[in-house]
């Protein structure tokens, strides 16, 4: 029995070491100032603070990759979320979205935070301060509504 446990531990350890060699690319693509959200959009301080605290790690090209994002299998999930998050909404390339996409994404931002789907629940396991209060949600939705109303009709 003891021997089986030892063998299992060794096998698990070897597997853990082996998976470390599969390292998906962890990148922060360059940020072009003219393409960012701030380039064409008025972002009040209080909105910027919420985005920075709760969203930017997955929705900009300026993600912070913490130490545990170096360790498989956690790294795989984190990198996946960042890549998918950026594909869906990248505030670093916001200015080059067309008007229709901007409107849709502004609506989604309010919807996602109101429904509690964003920030991603796994992010909240570690980033406890990323949790949004009702006030935060209102600040974000007031801002997305205001921005939407300033965009040209499509
Ligand atoms: C841990 C990474 C992570 C964080 C943090 C995060 N998101 Fe996301 N977000 C994702 C992923 C992954 C997707 C795409 C899959 C999905 O919809 O669940 C996504 C999708 C979205 C979408 C696109 C929905 C659509 O269908 O167009 C919006 C809008 C969004 N997030 C807003 C936010 C906002 C606002 C915050 C901060 C309050 C936030 N996210 C925080 C990972 C994240």
Image (cartoon, rainbow, N blue to C red):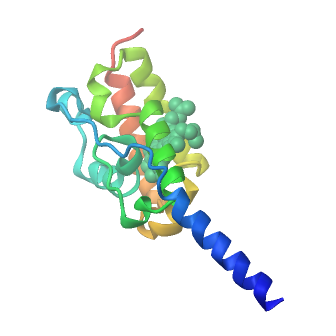
| 103 relative to 76 in the view: left or right | left
Which residue occupies 59% across, 72% down? Answer: 13
Which residue occupies 18% across, 30% down? Answer: 32
Q: Position of residue 52 (x, y in %)?
A: 31, 53
Q: Is residue 30 above or below residue 129?
A: above
Q: Position of residue 4 (x, y in %)?
A: 79, 82
Q: Nearer the viewer, residue 141 or 34?
A: 34
Residue that protrudes farthest toward the right in the picture = 1
Which residue occupies 44% across, 58% down? Answer: 135
Question: Can residue 7 be seen at all in this image of the molecule?
Answer: yes
Q: Is residue 47 above or below residue 3?
A: above
Q: Nearer the viewer, residue 133 or 112?
A: 112
Q: Position of residue 19 (x, y in %)?
A: 54, 57
| 3 relative to 103 in the view: left or right | right
Q: Is residue 35 above or below residue 129?
A: above
Q: Position of residue 154 (x, y in %)?
A: 42, 8
């Amino acid at each position: 029995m003891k021997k089986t446990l030892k063998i299992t531990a060794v096998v698990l350890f070897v597997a853990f070491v082996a998976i470390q060699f599969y390292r998906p690319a962890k990148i922060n693509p360059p940020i072009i100032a003219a393409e960012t959200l701030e380039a064409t959009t008025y972002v009040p301080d209080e909105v910027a603070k919420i985005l920075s605290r709760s969203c930017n790690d997955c929705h900009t090209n300026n993600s912070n990759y913490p130490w545990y994002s170096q360790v498989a299998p956690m790294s795989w999930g984190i990198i996946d979320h960042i890549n998918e998050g950026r594909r869906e909404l990248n505030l670093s390339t916001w200015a080059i979205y067309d008007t229709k996409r901007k409107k849709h994404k502004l609506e989604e931002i309010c919807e996602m935070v109101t429904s509690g789907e964003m920030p991603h629940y796994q992010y909240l396991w570690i980033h406890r301060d990323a949790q949004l209060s009702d006030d935060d949600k209102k600040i974000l939705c007031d801002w997305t509504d205001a921005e939407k109303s300033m965009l040209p009709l499509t």
